[in-house]
Image (spheres, rainbow, N blue to C red):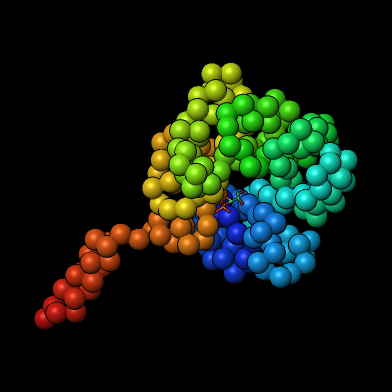
Amino acid sequence: MKFFVDTANIKEIKEANKLGLLAGVTTNPSLVAKEGVSFHDRLREITAEVSGSVSAEVISEDAEGMISEGKELAAIAPNITVKVPMTLEGLKAVKAFSDLNIKTNVTLVFNANQALLAARAGATYVSPFLGRLDDIGQNGMDLVATIAEIFDRHDIKTEIIAASIRHPMHVTEAALNGAHIATIPFKVLQQLVKHPLTDQGIEKFLSDWNQQK
Ligand code: E4P
């Protein structure tokens, strides 16, 4: 499983990229709005920093609008992936982007049929939102496992991005259940590194080292 970072904050993206394991970035309108910057300018900054896929979401609700927005986004850099909501109009747009060789990430996926439809329309990625399913008392991880099994059984190449990740256990379980990618808030990425025994071990090694005669 690969790691994307789920943020539009350029400082966080740069920090995450220094770790040498960052395979991409996902943004969404809420994350961009928090930044208070021009969307296109921020995408230019992100794509200059990260060579992997950078998801940029359209806000139109009709296919025609999505296609024209998506074309503009895709013109910013070759590694832009157009993020499209899981709707009937979104599926039409995904097909059009696929014909134009523009990569797509179908977002707001909450059941397996949505993922299958998106894949068959030509989506490069599908993003099941684990945390938001957990929030309403459903098991987000079961959805990842089901999509992974269906894609495997039908030899579907669309990649599964485990999204709406809230904590480190989501990451481990996403990997176990067949997600190709987890897109992770920067805070969770930092949490993944930490273990109290690692910290204690470092402290002990240093104090032993400093006490040597
Ligand atoms: C993924 O592409 C989304 O931007 C993101 O994971 C949504 O997460 P949230 O449910 O924490 O807003």
Measured from the top left, where is residue 59 in percent x and y?
A: 78, 51
**Could you tell whether 32 is left or right of 5 in the image?**
right
**Could you tell whether 188 is left or right of 123 in the image?**
left
Measured from the top left, where is residue 69 in percent x and y?
A: 84, 49
> In this view of the protein, can residue 127 be seen by the observer?
yes
**Quarter of image, res 6:** bottom right
Q: Residue at x 73, y 43 (%)?
A: 84
Measured from the top left, where is residue 157 in percent x and y?
A: 62, 28
**Could you tell whether 208 is left or right of 137 in the image?**
left
> As displayed, is residue 21 above or below residue 209?
above
Q: Depth check: give the residue in front, 16 or 107.
A: 107
> As displayed, is residue 40 above or below residue 136?
below
**Quarter of image, res 9:** bottom right
Measured from the top left, where is residue 184 in percent x and y?
A: 52, 53
Q: Residue at x 70, y 64 (%)?
A: 33
Q: Residue at x 50, y 27 (%)?
A: 146
Q: Residue furthest left?
A: 213
Quadrant into which the C terminus falls: bottom left
